[in-house]
Every structure is written in structure tokens, then in C-alpha cells.
Amino acid sequence: MDEAAISPGVGQPIPEWDLKHRLPTDRPVGPDLWDGGTIFRINSTFMDVTEQPFMERQWTALAAFFSSWGVIAAVWFYLLTHEQLDTPLPTKWRIIFNLLAFAALAGFGWLMFKTGRPVFFALKNRPIRFNRVEKKLFAIRRRRFFGRQDEGDVVAEAAWNKDSIFCIHREATNFGRVYHIRHYKTDAAGNVVDAFSIGREWTGDANVRTLLAQWNYWCSYMNDGPATLPKPMLFQTTHETLRESFFFSMYTFGFTAGGVVRMITMPFTLLFAALRSLSLATCREAVWPQSVLAVSAIRPDDAYVEPSNGTPVGWVQTIQAQQRGEYPDSPKGKVSNWTGEADGVENAKRWLSDEPPVQLASA
């Protein structure tokens, strides 16, 4: 679900469920601590993280692809009823077919624009920068086509403090319930002014445990630094190859799917990979404004700059390094000062209730 293609509730109050499941920035939310494949780079000053649509770009491209065929079909229908008939249509039917063709053209054209705008002739990725020095998040939202060179792309900011609103967001889809972490900015009346998602989307209640572990990972970085963090699941690449696009598309159908499922879904995987690659080919790299770069300086003696030389980047290099025993497979950690539910699965179940543990602890 690409939040650049749909409105994340702007002008409306924060959804009640989201607000009940607000995430604190000053304490952990569970016993687990790990990354789920969201990190581009990390150092003692900042950490660049993916935004939620990053892994599902191919789905948005697919919607734009089908919409474009709808536009072509509407034009073909118009020409068929006006240019290719031996006997001209009566005026009444001509008007009806005109209205049908124009309605289809407008509908599919609007859908093609809404779904295609974030993934074609836009940005290859929209990173979110967790800046420890400034105690802020800087999120690139969209491409800036006009403006001074130092302005960079359009950026939203969020303060890292207890007053900032970070929530678990839940959506019901045809594939079940999905969750992601969302930041809300509100006006004086409590209505949403802007919102953006962070990291990736998790499908199913069972994966809320991983969502909470991810939030702990980001909180630990912002509050304590990178020294004690387990390695990320992998470092995502900003220079995606066709092979990387294939892996993104394959994992659309699940990280742990078996060989039979992979074979059945292979035609869709190849289509998704082609659409993802085509989308990326039309886009450019994101450009940070000079104001953000000015507060993102990395110390020359920083011992925590990653990925460094020898660190694998992307699915292909990381899987190969894991097979050679040079990179840990699914590195995980535990929160050292956690005093709540010790079992991560049970803790996640409590978070899915209407009274999550963090609210009970702060009451």
C-alpha cells in the first residue's frame, strides 16, 4: 500500500485503533530487538531507513500498468464506435458511447496518474533519516522537479521526543490484516495534517512481534547509539540491479515460501521484476537538501559506519555471504532492561488487544 498514492487520513482525526496503539520513544515495547530488512546505512550520526512502499513498488507499478491498458481500451472503444463502423451510429447511441468512453478514459486516467506518480519518473527510493544529533527524523516524501539545487527533494520532519505521535497502523486487506509503523502530524484540533510510514509492512498478527522488535531497534539507536545493536537483517541497496528486483518480487510471496509455491508464482515474479525494473529505470536517486546534509556529518573516526568495505549490500550479496558464513543469518538481540512479558509472541498478542501493555504501564 503506497501512501503516496492514497491519502493517509489527512484532514481526519487519527484512527482510534492507531491512537490506542501509540508507540513510545523513551522505552522498549517488547523483549525482542532486531531489524527486519529496513536499513540502508548506519553510523553514529544517522541511520537511513526505508519507507513502507519500498518493498512493494512492483505492486504499485502493476496497478499503473493495468490502468494504462484501461486508458488504451477506452481510446480503442471510442475509435471503434466512430471510425471503424461501416454504418454510422444514430446520434442517440453515439452520445451514449461517447459518455461511456470518456468516463472510462477519465477513470482509468486518474487511476494511472495516482498509482504511477510515486513509481514512474519519481524517486528510486524515499529514505527516512533517523538523526541522533538533531533528535529528528527527516523523511523524503516526493521528487522536487523545480527549485534551487540546494533545496533537494521535498522533506518532512518529525521530532524524536515523547510528544511526537508514532503508532502501529492496521489495515484490513484481501490478504489479511497488515501492519506498519506510521508517524502522524496533527493540527490544534487533532486532525491529521501529514503522515508517513516507516520501514516495511508486516502481514498477519503473528508478525506484530517483528514490528515491535523493529521499533525497539530504531529506539535503541536513537536513544543509545549503534554500539550494542545486532547487525541488520541486510543492508538494502540504493543501486538496485535486475537481480535484486527479482528477489524483491520473489519475496512478495513470502520470505519462507517453499519450492512448489515459488514455481507456481514464478510467472508473476518475472512480471513483477520487469515492472519494478522499468519503474526504477524512469526514476532518479533522492537528493537531500543542504540543510539536512549540514547536520549529517560523519566523524572521520566513527567506528560504526556501515556498510563498510567487505559488508554485503542487498539480497544477492547478503545471501551469498551467509552461505559462506561471512554474515549472520537473521541476527537478533534482546532488550537488556525489559521487565514486561518475557515471551515475544505473548507480548505481541497483548499489543493487539484494545489495551496494549505500554498504556497499562504508563497509567
Image (tube, rainbow, N blue to C red):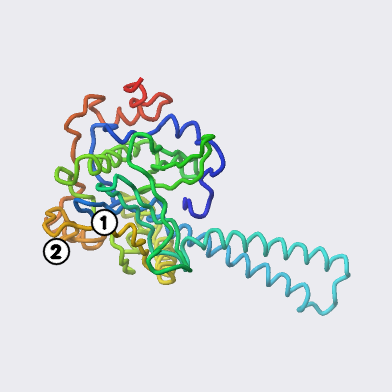
Residue 309 image label: 2
Element type at mark 1: loop
Quarter of the image with the C terminus is: top left
> Where's residue 343, x and y in %?
24, 28
Rendered residue at 53%/38% (across/down): 191
Element type at mark 2: loop
Rendered residue at 30%/49% (across/down): 130
Disc 2 or 1, which lies upstream in sequence?
Answer: 1
**Horizontal side, residue 236 vs residue 201: left or right:** left
In this view, the residue in front, 28 or 78, is: 28
Disc 2 versus disc 1: distance between alpha carbons? 21 Å
> Where's residue 112, x and y in %?
57, 62
Q: Is residue 353 above or below residue 12?
A: above
Query: What's under tag 2, amino acid-wise?
Result: Asn
Q: Is residue 284 above or below residue 37?
A: below
Q: Which image quadrant is residue 209 in?
A: top left
In this view, the residue in front, 332 or 166, is: 166
**Horizontal side, residue 297 vs residue 124: left or right:** left
Q: Residues within 10 Å of mark 1 (few under 14, many from 20)?
A: some
Q: Which residue is mark 1?
A: 296
> Where's residue 157, x and y in %?
39, 49
Q: Is residue 86 above or below residue 25?
A: below
Between tags 2 and 1, which lies in front?
A: 1
**Horizontal side, residue 320 vs residue 142: left or right:** left
In this view, the residue in front, 85 or 139, is: 139
Query: What's under tag 1, amino acid-wise?
Result: Ser
